[in-house]
Amino acid sequence: MKRLLFIFALIFAFGLTQTAQAQFLDKLKKKAEEKVKKEGEKRAGDKINKGVEKAYDEVEKQLTGKGEKKNADSTNSIEKQKNITTTKEIDNTPQAIINSKFDFIPGEKVIFFEDFSQDAVGDFPALWNTNGSAEVVTTNLAPGHWMRFNCRETIWTDALLQLPDNYTIEYDVIPIQGNDKRMAGWHMRLMQAKNVRAWDAGTAPGMGGFQFAVESIGRPSFNTWFLKSECRGVDLSSYSNDKEVYQKENKKYHIAIWIQKSRIRLYQDQNKLFDLPKGLPTDCVKIDRIRFENGAAMISNIRIAVGAPDMRSKLLTEGKLISYGIYFDVNKDVVKPESYPSIKEIATILKDNPDVKIKIVGHTDSDGDNNSNLDLSKRRAASVKNSLVKDFNIEEARIETDGKGENEPVAKNDSAVNKALNRRVEFIKI
């Protein structure tokens, strides 16, 4: 009845004079009240009464110009809130922990790095294995070499990884079209292999692990699984309904995973997507392999590092801090946003110790021309200083900069891992 009354009000009220409109609505209201009284349904009467009052008020606002007019943005916000409420009421699946706080700091010592630079374009990458196919490619979407796959099979690290309790994993990914000419999504597993020389089949392969998946619609999700019967009760799964973190086709994303014993934190660009305190119980699984599968994507710059850096002690006590958590694109000197937590730590140390002065020194690997690398390293050091000054209000006079290019390596430039070790930023107490 409430809807019918409201519709009649809208249809007829606009065709009447203002006096007649008011009379019409008053009669409409009285008629509804009489109807309720006759039926003796007090609760229904209250609902109808409220509905008529609302209809009366809304029509009166339209006729007299009173009240604020809703714009498209406010309407969209209301609709979004309705959608969120509906999802929570209907779907009993545990919701993902969403947090925009980006506090990721990469491990100090690089133990695995893969940018496919040692592989020829068109080849399957040498350090990997597959029961399907993949190839090394270049793309106009981002510099460097990338491993592209488009399959329902799997591609995994051939040799088993020797990982401690605490480590970080990072990589860049670009979702691409699948065989049906639309974004296919992609999956990544961190798992304990059961068959160390080949792939482990099934939806719960190996001895268990953690899977991060991006659906074809771009929605990020995760799940864990464990082979041991006593561990199966701690399996977890969820997803993010935040449309702002949905992935899109042909866009590059930086994925960072921070594992501290059983805790897993997963970040996408500057967003923390998931934080699982008991995601990988240490008595249930021991991660030793990375695997990509089920979808279409390009992957590169896979970096695994161990040991959380004690920045304060190294800078103040030892007088020198080497950072691998400050990022630049290839041949660029612009500090990337994911460098924020590492630079923030340096800024905090300087604010807590106002008498300390530092020199920032940039270093590169040996790829490219020596003079160009020297210039690049100087510009990168200057960019880090600029961030400390502008973003964190550190006094410019407290910071000097320099660059050494490829001239002071800490490892031979003979492998992807060693080159990654040479690409660094040093902070020296002066």
Image: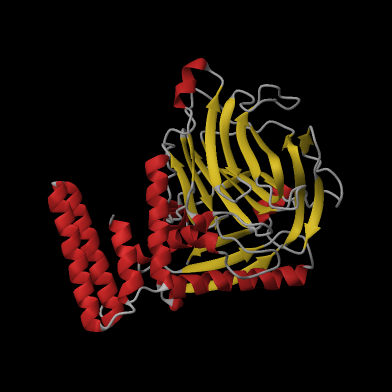
Would you say residue 358 is visible in this rendering?
A: yes
Which color scheme did the rendering employ for the protein? secondary structure
Give the residue at the far top of this rendering: 229
Image point (23%, 62%), residue name = 52
Please state the total of marks drawn on the protein image: 0
Residue 181 percent across, percent down from the top left: 75, 52
> Looking at the picture, does residue 353 appear above or below residue 201?
below
Using residue 167 as the reference point, say whether residue 186 is left or right of it.
Answer: right
Image point (59%, 51%), residue name = 218
Residue in the foreground of this view, choosing between 238 and 366:
238
> Looking at the picture, does residue 174 appear above or below residue 97?
below
> Looking at the picture, does residue 53 appear above or below residue 96?
below
Residue 37 percent across, percent down from the top left: 12, 52
Residue in the foreground of this view, choosing between 119 and 72:
72
Using residue 164 as the reference point, say whether residue 417 is left or right of it.
Answer: right
Image point (59%, 31%), residue name = 287
**Location of residue 389 (image quadrant):** bottom left
Residue 222 percent across, percent down from the top left: 53, 39
Residue in the foreground of this view, choosing between 62 and 160:
62
In what quadrant of the picture does the N terminus appear? bottom left
**Location of residue 365 (image quadrant):** bottom right
Would you say residue 410 is visible in this rendering?
A: no
Residue 134 percent across, percent down from the top left: 80, 43
Using residue 218 as the reference point, say whether residue 120 is left or right of it.
Answer: right
> Looking at the picture, does residue 259 appear above or below residue 398?
above
**Location of residue 409 (image quadrant):** bottom right
Using residue 67 as the reference point, say whether residue 349 is left or right of it.
Answer: right
